[in-house]
């Protein structure tokens, strides 16, 4: 089933969710490693992976927004959640969209302002700039830490629902009938 049902997410929503999750983890790992890399060649290599993956996450996020807005409906909340939990879950999901779009925007801002693309993508003689000299670097780095916190909270809530409440929330966000 491609579209969601009242009790579970459809294959398209599930695919977008898990692919985005894996890519965001890869982006966080490569971004933190690039930020701490002392060698310009290592940093450029990490950014050659990081930047295209960020574009893919941007496209997946746009697809997800359009999918929910135009083509599918989200399932009903899990087993009689208290209203505050429903609201908090909605806030967390909206926060993910905002953080992802903000991270992409600040990354693009760094690339444009620093002129780093030639050095990252292999132009002869181009040198990698000091990204900390450009204003979008601060929000990009801070946003990465906030995104980690949001991911930990999101995963913790999913595990709480799966194992403490026993409402099998993770089953709703996986493939199958």
Image: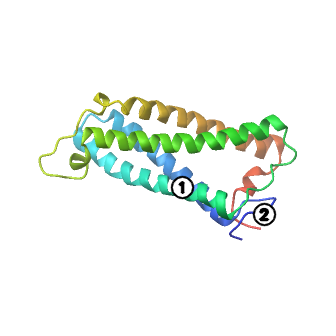
The residue under label 1 is 62
Q: Earlier in the sequence, mark 1 or mark 2?
A: 2
- Quarter where residue 67 is shown: bottom right
Find numbered disc 2 in the image and state the secondary structure of the residue it sits on. loop
- Quarter where residue 110 is shown: top left
Question: Residue 160: percent from the left, percent from the top?
Answer: 75, 40
121 sits left or right of 165 in the view: left
Q: Is residue 25 above or below residue 68?
A: above
Find numbered disc 1 in the image and state the secondary structure of the residue it sits on. helix
Crowdedness near tag 1: few (<14), some (14–19) or many (≥20) residues, C-alpha within 10 Å: few
Question: Residue 124: percent from the left, percent from the top?
Answer: 13, 51
Question: Residue 134: percent from the left, percent from the top?
Answer: 31, 31
Quadrant placement of the N terminus: bottom right
126 sits left or right of 62 in the view: left
Residue name at image x 71 percent, y 42 percent: 90
Crowdedness near tag 2: few (<14), some (14–19) or many (≥20) residues, C-alpha within 10 Å: some
Mark 1 touches mark 2? (CB < 8 Å): no
Q: CA distance from mark 1 to mark 2?
A: 22 Å
| Image mark for residue 5 | 2
């Amino acid at each position: 089933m491609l579209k969601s049902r009242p009790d579970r997410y459809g294959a398209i929503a599930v695919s977008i969710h898990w692919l985005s999750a894996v890519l965001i983890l890869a982006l966080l790992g490569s971004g933190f490693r690039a930020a701490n890399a002392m060698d310009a060649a290592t940093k450029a290599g990490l950014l050659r992976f990081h930047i295209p993956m960020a574009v893919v996450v941007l496209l997946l996020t746009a697809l997800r927004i359009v999918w929910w807005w135009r083509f599918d409906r989200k399932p009903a909340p899990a087993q009689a959640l208290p209203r505050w939990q429903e609201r908090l879950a909605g806030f967390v999901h909206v926060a993910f969209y905002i953080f992802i779009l903000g991270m992409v925007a600040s990354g693009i801002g760094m690339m444009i302002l620093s002129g780093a693309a030639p050095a990252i993508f292999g132009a002869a003689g181009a040198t990698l700039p000091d990204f900390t000299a450009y204003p979008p670097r601060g929000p990009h780095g801070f946003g990465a830490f906030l995104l980690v916190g949001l991911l930990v909270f999101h995963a913790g809530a999913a595990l709480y629902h799966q194992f403490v409440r026993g409402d099998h929330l993770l089953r709703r966000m996986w493939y199958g009938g």
